[in-house]
Image (cartoon, rainbow, N blue to C red):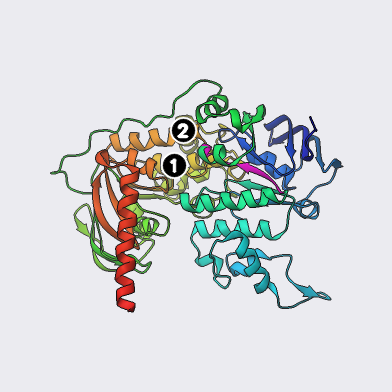
Amino acid sequence: MDQPDIAVHVKGIGKSFGGTRILNDITIDFHKGTVHALVGENGAGKSSVGKIIGGYYSADEGLVEIDGEVVTRFSPRDALHRGIAMIHQELQLVPELTVLQNVFLGQESSRGGVLVGGDLDRFKTLEETCAFGLDPDAKVATLRIAERQKVEIMRAVARDANVIIMDEPTSSLTEDEAERLHGLIARLRSRGTTIIYVSHFLDHILATCDRVTVMRDGEVIRTDPISGETKQSLVDSMLGQASEIIWPDLPLPPTDDVAPIAQMRNVATTSGLSDISLSIRPGEIVGLIGLVGSGRTEVGRALFGADRILWGEYSLGGEVQKNLTIHRAVQNGIALVPEDRRKEGLVLTQTTRPNVSLASLNRISRMGVLNTRAERDRVATMIKHFGIVPAKVDGEVAFYSGGNQQKVLLSKWAVDKPKLLILDEPSRGVDIGARQRIHEFIVEMAADGVGILLISSELEEVINLSHRGYLMSDGRIFAEADCRELTVSDALRRIFQEQGQNNNTKEGVIA
């Protein structure tokens, strides 16, 4: 039997940050023209392996071979010159530039060092391959996260790379968008491109990949063909024990006579929402059920005072709010965990301690002087409660895995129980273990009397974790449902039916 050609070979790789060992003796072969998955819990080291191959991290020990040649000095630019491109989980785009400019950044058409035309034609050719439907002239700052993720993918494909590292490429995409991406991956593979696919979506891995490496605690557990794997076999290897993926039991919902914490009636906002009517009661988990772009995030932002209300009525604790600001929302006991944790939720230049304390400094200060002992005790309690790794009060959050960063962000609001907690994609880009802990946290908060608004692109998650749900489409809430009687297929059927009715109405108006 012929030996497969090796695109990338890593052998004996070790890496530490601040005295914390994150990779130990990593040895993997990535075969040419295959899709190779890296799976494991957050903190297992998957992304770190990708960043070493992509030139973003340097290994403390071991070696990297590209096409059989040992690489001694490696940077992202060196990696690109050797045909390796990386799509980051935390997007690396320039918000003030257009889609076109971001896609070809660093490889613009030029002659004699002077920029010339032609990039639009290149973009159109690239769009024929990717089929993402992006506007090349749109400024990236105006795009939703799902669209920004597509820009990052296009940028990697535009470099004609032989190896593309994809770190959680579908974390913000709908199932339909993910299927289109997987079609693109299949086309790239048929051309001989090697894909290193880092993901927590095990169904995507089973359907798309050829081989899989399971990692745990910075070490390789095993590498095997995907053909012999199941979702359960991967989970068991990731966790080191047999386990089931289960949903926590919800607390009993509040009775109908309990007054809402928050209530909206016929609200419209500057972000494009219209006719939003909803209520959230203490101890109740309310889900927003819709596809990407339906307006779910915008509802959360309006409740938090981040987007201005144009008309309609918004009440908190029975009191009508006029010109609500974020500062006043926090004073009223409203908390928001945003979908983009790195840009909107965390201060990556700071450690765990100030990140957890930031929203509640008044509780541990007197006359403007911070009680650092009380602060450290509170943060240590949160680290233990959530199982944050590394368990350091002054750990460097910028180098934490996605799941542990998310736990730090949740701790920021859990340390002082809010009245209303808005969770926007709380389990995005986290492993099954961290996801289970986040689900348990949601239920714990509701059982403690906190009202929860849950937003998630994974309809199974939002339906299984909510008492009630509001179905959304085109910036509107069009129905309310008891989630105990709702299925994913029924929700999708109703959403697509609503979209069809809206499209028919628009066509009738145009006609």
Residue at 75% across, 42% down = 32
Q: Is residue 237 within the magenta segment?
A: no
Judge from the rendering whether residue 231 lies leftward or rightward of residue 194; answer left or right.
left
Q: Where's residue 432, x and y in %?
A: 49, 33
The amino acid type, in three-letter code, at marker 2 is Phe
- Please identify the residue farthest to the left as the structure is shown: 257
Q: Is residue 196 within the magenta segment?
A: yes
* Residue that numbered label 1 is attached to: 410
Closer-to-camera residue (99/496) = 496
Closer-to-camera residue (443/110) = 110
Q: Count the marks: how many?
A: 2
Q: Tag 2 or tag 1, which sits nearer the N-term?
A: 2
Residue 332 appearing in the image: no
Q: Residues within 10 Å of mark 1 (few under 14, many from 20)?
A: many
* Residue that numbered label 2 is attached to: 386
Residue range corresponding to the magenta coloring? 193-202
Tell me if label 1 and label 2 are in contact, CB under 8 Å: yes
Closer-to-camera residue (259/159) = 159
Q: Where's residue 424, x and y in %?
A: 41, 49
* Image height of 27 relative to 284, above or below: above
Residue at 50% across, 27% down = 232
